[in-house]
């Protein structure tokens, strides 16, 4: 799991690693206000799940609060394309406004899990900044490594080797080693898969400072990291899920096929996905309605499914128990009409008040067909998705 730079810096500072003073904002006017509070020159940094912002125009400096507002306006609401993003880029909805730092040296420091040795490895280089990937390629000897044995933890001798290897001045050695130890403590405590400070700078005033920070976490450990839950920014990499969450649609998952799926219950949902695959089809997503549908949420969920351009047909498989058939039907029909779609829908509806539900479908005028059972609904959906069958039957 990724988080933003500003969140990573907050965690670093909790572990005693110095970061520039700053504040994250979402509005240009707020950027001006923060710049005023910080005084002097500020740096405005796009908060996105991608590095390479410096070279892509995602980091701007401003000499006055007025200029900070202008630069903020240039970044906010845009998409940023960097070397590390797709050509569509990533949305910039937040910016970090920070005091500008006068840099003497840019270093590199990170910890990842090394797959070969299955140990955390700390990597350090005196050639930090924006070129580190190239340096690692061209002159790997400039990236120093220390493998950390968890039972003995990060050892001071390892810190000294890295610090001297980075050609630090004598007075910077001890603070650097301390900082390395703190980064390892954070890495361990938070179940990181990556903790990276690039650049780690020595300021003109001789202070060590994390100027940029990147933390990734092991997804399998999130359950025991409650303070991290909820930090993930869905908008960055999963825009459809983000919109679903915004509309109060829970239990929506995007997949990569072309059959939209609205099913109630986790078990039936998995069965539908497997069945589609067996028949040579592929789910584009699924929405698990849960046992007690709210027509409004069903309608919103349908809109999310129907607005996805990869969806060619929507499969509905509902066994109405506690949640009555007409509530599902009304929600789906409302969502269909609101989304202005012509998508074919294949419906298998059974259970409580099924006749009322079917009547709602029949009178709605939407492009739907009925299926007799689970097998039938899957087969019809696959056929339509493959273009072997029209929407109406
Ligand atoms: P990245 O390109 O996405 O990794 O973004 P970084 O946060 O690492 O910033 C890229 C570069 O911008 C850094 O290596 C610095 O050279 C420069 N930079 C960022 N913040 C400051 C600052 O406060 N002062 C100065 N002088 N340069 C900065
Ligand atoms: Mn960086």
Image: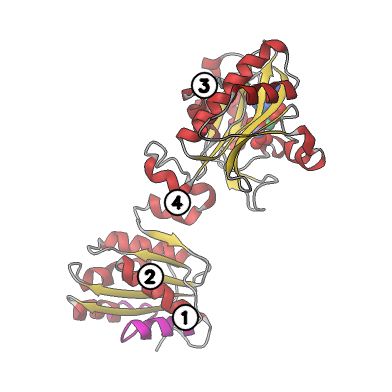
Which mark, by number, is residue 34? 3
Q: For residue 5, what is the image quadrant?
A: top right
The tag earlier along the polypeptide, 3 or 4, is 3
Q: CA distance from mark 2 to mark 1?
A: 12 Å
Q: Residues within 10 Å of mark 1 (few under 14, many from 20)?
A: few
Residue contact between numbered discs 1 and 4, judged by CB atoms under 8 Å? no
Secondary structure under tag 4 reads: helix
Please name the residue shown 74% across and 26% down the image.
Answer: 126
Taking the image in four quarters, ligand 1 sits in the one at: top right
* Residue located beneath label 1 in the image: 278
The tag earlier along the polypeptide, 4 or 2, is 4
Please name the residue shown 34% across and 81% down the image.
Answer: 374
Which mark, by number, is residue 3? none
User: Where does the image place residue 193, in percent across and percent down from the top left?
Assistant: 54, 42
The tag earlier along the polypeptide, 2 or 3, is 3
Tag count? 4
Which mark, by number, is residue 270? 2
Please name whichever residue, 196 or 343, is drawn nearer the observer in this view of the structure: 196
The tag earlier along the polypeptide, 1 or 4, is 4
Q: Is residue 58 visible?
A: no
Q: CA distance from mark 3 to mark 4?
A: 28 Å
Please name whichever residue, 267 or 300, is drawn nearer the observer in this view of the structure: 267
Q: Is residue 85 visible?
A: yes
């Amino acid at each position: 799991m990724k988080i933003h730079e500003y969140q990573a810096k907050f965690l670093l500072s909790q572990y005693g690693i110095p970061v520039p003073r700053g504040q994250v904002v979402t509005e240009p006017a707020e950027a001006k206000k923060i710049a005023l509070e910080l005084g002097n020159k500020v740096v405005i940094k796009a908060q996105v799940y991608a590095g390479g912002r410096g070279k892509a125009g995602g980091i701007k400096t401003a000499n006055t609060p007025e200029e900070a507002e202008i630069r903020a306006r240039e970044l906010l609401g845009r998409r940023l394309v960097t070397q590390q993003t797709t050509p569509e880029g990533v949305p910039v909805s937040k910016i970090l406004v920070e005091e500008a730092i006068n840099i003497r040296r840019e270093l590199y420091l990170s910890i990842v899990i090394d797959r070969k040795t299955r140990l955390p490895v700390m990597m350090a280089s005196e050639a930090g900044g924006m070129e580190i990937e190239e340096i690692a390629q061209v002159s790997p000897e400039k990236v120093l490594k220390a493998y950390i044995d968890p039972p003995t933890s990060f050892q001071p001798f390892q810190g000294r080797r890295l610090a001297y290897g980075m050609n630090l001045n004598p007075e910077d050695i001890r603070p650097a080693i301390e900082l390395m130890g703190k980064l390892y403590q954070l890495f361990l405590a938070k179940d990181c898969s990556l903790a990276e400070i690039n650049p780690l700078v020595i300021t003109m005033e001789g202070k060590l400072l994390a100027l940029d920070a990147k933390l990734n976490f092991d997804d399998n450990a999130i359950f025991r990291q409650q303070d991290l839950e909820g930090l993930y920014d869905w908008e960055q990499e999963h825009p459809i899920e983000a919109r679903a969450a915004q509309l109060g649609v829970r239990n929506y998952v995007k997949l990569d096929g072309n059959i939209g799926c609205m099913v109630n219950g986790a078990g039936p949902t998995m069965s539908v996905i497997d069945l589609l695959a067996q028949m040579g089809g592929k789910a584009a997503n699924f929405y698990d309605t849960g046992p007690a549908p709210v027509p409004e949420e069903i309608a919103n969920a349908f809109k999310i499914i129907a607005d996805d351009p990869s969806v060619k047909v929507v499969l509905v498989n509902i066994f109405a128990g506690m949640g009555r058939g007409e509530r599902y039907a009304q929600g789906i029909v409302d969502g269909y009409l609101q989304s202005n779609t012509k998508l074919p829908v294949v419906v298998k509806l059974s259970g409580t008040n099924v006749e009322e539900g079917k009547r709602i479908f029949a009178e709605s005028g939407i492009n739907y067909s009925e299926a007799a059972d689970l097998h039938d609904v899957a087969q019809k959906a696959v056929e339509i998705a493959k273009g072997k069958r029209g929407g109406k039957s």
